[in-house]
Image: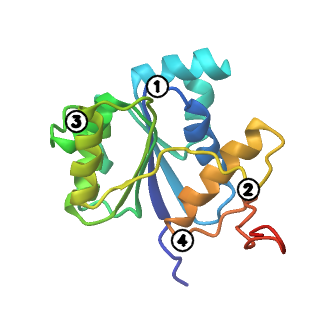
Amino acid sequence: MTTSKPQRLIVAITGASGAIYGVRILEALRQIDGCESHLVLSSAGGLTAQQELDMTRADIEALADVVHSSRDIGATVASGSFATLGMIVAPCSMKTLASIAHGLADNLVSRAADVVLKERRRLVLLARETPLNLAHLRNMVAVTEMGAIVAPPVPAFYTRPASIDELVDHTVARVLDLFELDHRVALKRWPGLRPGASD
């Protein structure tokens, strides 16, 4: 009897505000049968998570199947021969965005992203900054031209969210949809305009 290979997805958490997105993605991936999460948590990402969520690095790492140091350029996810579905950077700091846009591969987050791009796999960046300066915008254009998807965690209010968790889950579900994963995150999909709404 042969067993199917796990679907591997890389999740990076960097130092921008919004660590909850990366954490919630890891939690959602744990509920998907046959999905193996590979976490790269930057030092700044760990500090931000502690500040925003009162979570330690160990707390976050416990949510992943495999953990890689952001300094380990020899990790499996640094090679294109290691098959994955792709990578999510949630949140994606402007520093990380710039590193990916310019192909620096100066740590495992940007190296793994570089690998995903060169192998033509899906790379989704939850870019977190506002307002945006011209460098930010140009870097977003650059990564988009390379094949990445820039997906700022912008809330959808047509769902009439009642909590921050609902706002976060909507974004997380939309991101996981991009990988065609059979996730269990609640998502209120657009039902079309209600009768009389356009009058």
- Measured Cα–Cα span from mark 4 to mark 2: 23 Å
- Residue under the point 45% across and 29% down: 130
Measuring from the top left, give residue 66's x and y in whole percent: 48, 44
- Relative placement, left or right, of 189 versus 40 is right
Sequence-first tag of 3 and 1:
1
Image disc number at residue 158: 2
Sequence-first tag of 1 and 4:
1
Sequence-first tag of 2 and 3:
3
Measuring from the top left, give residue 4's x and y in whole percent: 51, 76
Sequence-first tag of 1 and 2:
1
How crowded pointer 2 is (Cα within 10 Å; few <14, some 14-19, many 20+) is rated as few
Q: What element carries label 1?
A: helix
- Measured Cα–Cα span from mark 1 to mark 4: 26 Å
**Residue of label 3:** 99
Residue depth check, mark 4 versus mark 2: number of the one nearer the observer: 2
Residue depth check, mark 2 versus mark 3: number of the one nearer the observer: 2
For the residue pair 17 and 133, the one nearer the viewer reads as: 133
Amino acid carrying label 4: it is Glu
Amino acid carrying label 1: it is Gly
- Measured Cα–Cα span from mark 3 to mark 1: 16 Å
Amino acid carrying label 3: it is Ser
Q: What element carries label 3?
A: helix
